[in-house]
């Protein structure tokens, strides 16, 4: 008998030691009164415990008070920053959160259904107010499966793990927000060349939705046949090394829209290693308008050359005629020669003026240099009720309509959008200046982003002549630039302007 008693005492000591010294938070709880109460509810006709507790939240509190905490170990006291075991047991509600109650309802449903175990995630609080993410498990001993008098609960602190998950989710959300706000197409391919990311601008530029392109070979889908051989050769090297002739460079090429037509793009590709494999991230800009402008500039240059040829030819003829008339007049004193000289001078003067007007009509290179930031500040000071900031600086090519263009943009944001704040962000590369005019008004519906620049287009009760933004676009185009609008998340609009930078 003494031997048995010693063995029992030894087993009890080992149990207490394991309980107290366990690195995991352990609770010994008594759910017997909770079990009896849930049994009473069922006898009273409650068939759906979830619905019942949703409609009777005070009964959740009642059930929580029926749970008896028999014991907790040292790790539990440390985890919840309690001063003592008694402090924790007498102030249990201190560690509860709204999420704790939701988890507790799930446990009540398990008990009500006669189940002997539960596991799930829960959010509690420490005594000094810090939130704890925990993984909760409880189970019954076989002897107590009917009355739930002994329930062992374990809590594992998973706060660090959940913080990493939340950080990853936040990072992914930021990435998607940024890429979907971008005006350029952003497309990523995996180590086999299949598309695994496709932003909103890619859908607009290529006319294909993510569902249509995900998992398909990018170059087979978008690139004309003449590029395929070079791609296959370069991609084989890229898969192994993340390097290639086009990586980290900007190049121009042609791609397909969904209707099979080709259009020019500017393509930049970066190598990104994910899961030990190289992925290709492409930034693709539609340069159709830029190419058209370049062609128009080339055509205008040819016209100006032709004008100069005509001018030189006709002036040379007129000067020859004038010289001849002068010589005859000197020899003979023929007054008719004076009339001829006057006529040829007038003809030459008229020709010069005519060619000058023609040149001004077809040329857009009569531009001056302006500090864009100074001119935005000058115009914004005319709107004293509008708060503004100007970040960055750049000098650009424009003409004397610059102030009118800026004023139209600011007036549009104040009058039509109703903003009381405007931020100007200026950045530049060697050849290009980007200006972002950011307002925080009511914004512009996405289906109107392209229409607002059309001549005569009006929208809403504040719409007037429908010329302001049309003039803005025409003027900027004459300077060799471009303008478009995008959403300012969560509220407002951003007018993005690209101009020729004075390098």
Image (tube, helix red, strand yellow):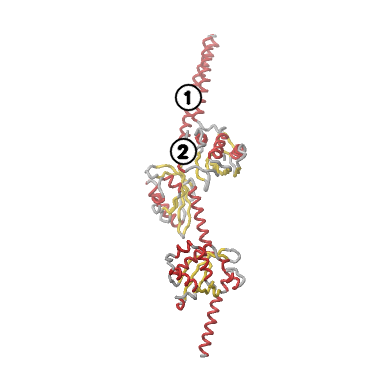
Vertical placement of residue 404 versus 179, above or below: above
Residue 470 in percent (x, y) is at 50, 35
The image quarter containing residue 16 is bottom right
Task: Tell me the distance, in whole angstroms, between the alpha carbons under discs 2 and 1.
Answer: 41 Å
Residue 177 in percent (x, y) is at 50, 51
Residue 333 in percent (x, y) is at 54, 9
Residue that sits furthest to the bottom in the current view: 1
Q: Residues within 10 Å of mark 2 (few under 14, many from 20)?
A: some
Disc nearer the start of the sequence (2/1):
1
In the picture of the structure, the residue carrying the numbered disc 1 is 310
As helix, strand or loop, the secondary structure at mark 1 comes to helix
Vertical placement of residue 155 versus 237, above or below: below
Judging depth in this view, the residue of 158 and 131 nearest the camera is: 131
In the picture of the structure, the residue carrying the numbered disc 2 is 451
Q: Residue at x 45, y 65 (%)?
A: 49
Residue 143 in percent (x, y) is at 46, 78
As helix, strand or loop, the secondary structure at mark 2 comes to helix
Judging depth in this view, the residue of 90 and 177 nearest the camera is: 90
Please say whether residue 203 is visible from this viewpoint: yes
Judging depth in this view, the residue of 92 and 244 nearest the camera is: 92
The tally of labels here is 2
Judging depth in this view, the residue of 89 and 317 nearest the camera is: 89
Vertical placement of residue 484 versus 66, above or below: above
């Amino acid at each position: 008998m003494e031997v048995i008693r010693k063995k029992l005492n030894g087993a009890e000591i080992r149990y207490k030691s394991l309980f107290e010294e366990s690195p995991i938070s352990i609770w010994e709880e008594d759910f017997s009164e909770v079990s009896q109460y849930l049994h009473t509810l069922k006898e009273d006709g409650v068939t759906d415990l979830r619905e019942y507790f949703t409609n009777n939240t005070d009964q959740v509190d009642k059930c929580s008070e029926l749970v008896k905490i028999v014991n907790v170990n040292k790790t539990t006291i440390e985890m919840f920053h309690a001063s003592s075991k008694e402090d924790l047991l007498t102030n249990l509600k201190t560690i509860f959160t709204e999420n704790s109650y939701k988890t507790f309802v799930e446990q009540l449903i398990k008990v009500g259904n006669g189940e002997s175990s539960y596991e799930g995630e829960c959010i509690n609080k420490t005594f000094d107010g810090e939130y704890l993410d925990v993984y909760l498990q409880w189970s019954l001993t076989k002897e107590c499966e009917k009355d739930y008098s002994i329930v062992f609960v374990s809590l594992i602190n998973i706060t660090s793990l959940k913080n990493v998950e939340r950080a990853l989710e936040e990072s992914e959300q930021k990435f998607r927000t940024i890429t979907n706000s971008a005006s350029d197409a952003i497309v990523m391919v995996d180590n086999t060349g299949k598309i695994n990311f496709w932003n909103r601008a890619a859908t607009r530029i290529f006319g294909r939705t993510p569902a249509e392109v995900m998992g398909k070979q990018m170059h087979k889908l978008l690139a004309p046949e003449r590029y395929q051989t070079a791609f296959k050769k370069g991609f084989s090297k890229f898969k192994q090394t993340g390097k290639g002739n086009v990586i980290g460079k900007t190049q121009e090429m042609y791609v397909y829209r969904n209707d099979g037509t080709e259009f020019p793009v500017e393509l930049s590709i970066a190598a990104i290693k994910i899961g030990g494999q190289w992925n290709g991230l492409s930034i693709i800009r539609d340069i159709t308008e830029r190419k058209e402008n370049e062609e128009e500039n080339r055509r205008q240059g040819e016209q100006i050359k032709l004008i100069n040829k005509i001018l030189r030819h006709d002036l040379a003829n007129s000067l020859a005629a004038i010289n001849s008339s002068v010589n005859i007049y000197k020899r003979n004193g023929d007054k008719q020669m004076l009339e001829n000289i006057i006529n040829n001078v007038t003809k030459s003067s008229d020709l010069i003026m005519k060619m000058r007007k023609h040149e001004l009509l077809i040329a857009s290179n009569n531009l001056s240099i302006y500090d864009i930031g100074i001119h935005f500040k000058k115009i914004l000071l005319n709107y004293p009720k509008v708060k503004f900031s100007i970040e960055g600086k750049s000098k650009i090519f424009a003409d004397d309509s610059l102030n009118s263009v800026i004023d139209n943009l600011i007036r549009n944001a104040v009058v039509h959008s109703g903003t009381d704040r405007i931020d100007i962000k200026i950045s530049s590369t060697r050849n290009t200046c980007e200006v972002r005019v950011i307002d925080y008004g009511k914004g512009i519906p996405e289906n109107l982003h392209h229409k607002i620049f059309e001549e005569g287009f009006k929208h809403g009760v504040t719409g007037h002549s429908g010329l302001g933004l049309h003039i803005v676009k025409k003027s900027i185009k004459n300077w060799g630039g471009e303008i478009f609008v995008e959403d300012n998340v969560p509220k407002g609009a951003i007018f993005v302007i690209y101009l020729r930078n004075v390098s």
